[in-house]
Image (cartoon, rainbow, N blue to C red):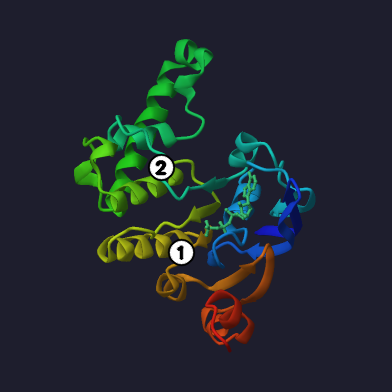
Amino acid sequence: MLTVSDVSIAFGGFQALRGVSMVARPGSIVGLVGPNGSGKSTLLNIVSGIYRPDAGKVRLNDKPLPLGRIEAVAARGIGRTFQVPRLAQRLTVLQNMLVGARDQPGERLFDLFLRPGRVAAMEADALARSVAILKRLGLVEKANDYAGNLSGGQQKLLTMGVLLMSDPQVLLLDEPAAGVNPVLIEQQVEFLRSLRDEGRAIVLIEHNMEMISNVCDVVYVLDAGAVIAEGTPAEIRDNAEVIQSYLGQPA
Ligand SMILES: Nc1ncnc2c1ncn2[C@@H]1O[C@H](COP(=O)(O)OP(=O)(O)OP(=O)(O)O)[C@@H](O)[C@H]1O
């Protein structure tokens, strides 16, 4: 279980997060919504190890995460995507997937020279896992296309696939549906549900409220760096404070 406790961070004099707490259980999808600038991406930046908070803790299965150390946090099983897909545009879809495989023994000289059989077996395993994930994403026919030639929506699907190659317990997804056509959003939704059914925890930033309502078990609403509401999508929809602050309408 991912547990964020009382996290605060300021940039210069600007308080971006103030005492934010959040829980993401295995086998659940947690939505993170709120107006632009409310601190959603900053929270993911902290959980994924990019920033060290000024105060507060983040734990995975009761063990504190080494915040501020991206590689160390990733190695604990936390993976993240960004609003703009970060793919190697001039590598193929399959090559991008293989780059995503964590801890490849072929990267270590010792293994390469002294345990070539093990390296070959691990590479065959990474290849098989890549193909299996690409099938789940409906991208297997594109395996040999350059990532840069995929549509924006397909690139977002591929970033999720690359992330899954490192087998994360927690996936942090920053606006996966933005700019994506409805057919591919439906495909994302199916994929997210399958990840949840595997027991992974997903934290999803999204402005698409239909998607949030469709897939989330619980939703947190941030406003000006603080959590102003938490509950099921239906509870959030009916929350007067949320309606006022997030949708800018009188309750
Ligand atoms: N590295 C930084 N330096 C200075 N200010 C920052 C930094 N990162 C975030 N901020 C500020 O913190 C606030 C929260 O930003 P953040 O990107 O977390 O918001 P958001 O809720 O994700 O917004 P959006 O929906 O537009 O992506 C913003 O005012 C932003 O300018």
Camera-side residue of 11 and 182: 11
The residue beneath circle 2 is 162
Cα–Cα span, label 2 and label 1: 19 Å
Residue, x 19% and y 45% (percent of image)? Answer: 141
Residue positioned 33% across, 63% down in the render? 185
Residue positioned 57% across, 73% down in the render: 218
Q: Name the quadrant of the C terminus.
A: bottom right
**Does 2 appear above or below 28?**
above
Q: Does the Cβ of the disc 1 residue fall within 8 Å of ligand 1?
A: no
Residue 145 relative to residue 247: left or right: left
Circle 1 residue: 197
Q: Quadrant of residue 21?
A: bottom right
Label 2 is placed on what type of residue?
Answer: Val
Instruction: Pick whichever of labels 2 and 1 is earlier in the sequence.
Output: 2
**SS type, badge 1:** helix
Residues marked 2 and 1 touching at CB (< 8 Å): no
Give the side of residue 229 with respect to residue 149, left or right: right
Marker disc for residue 165: none
Residue placed most toward the observer, 27 or 87: 87
Give whichever of 238, 26 is nearer the camera. Answer: 238
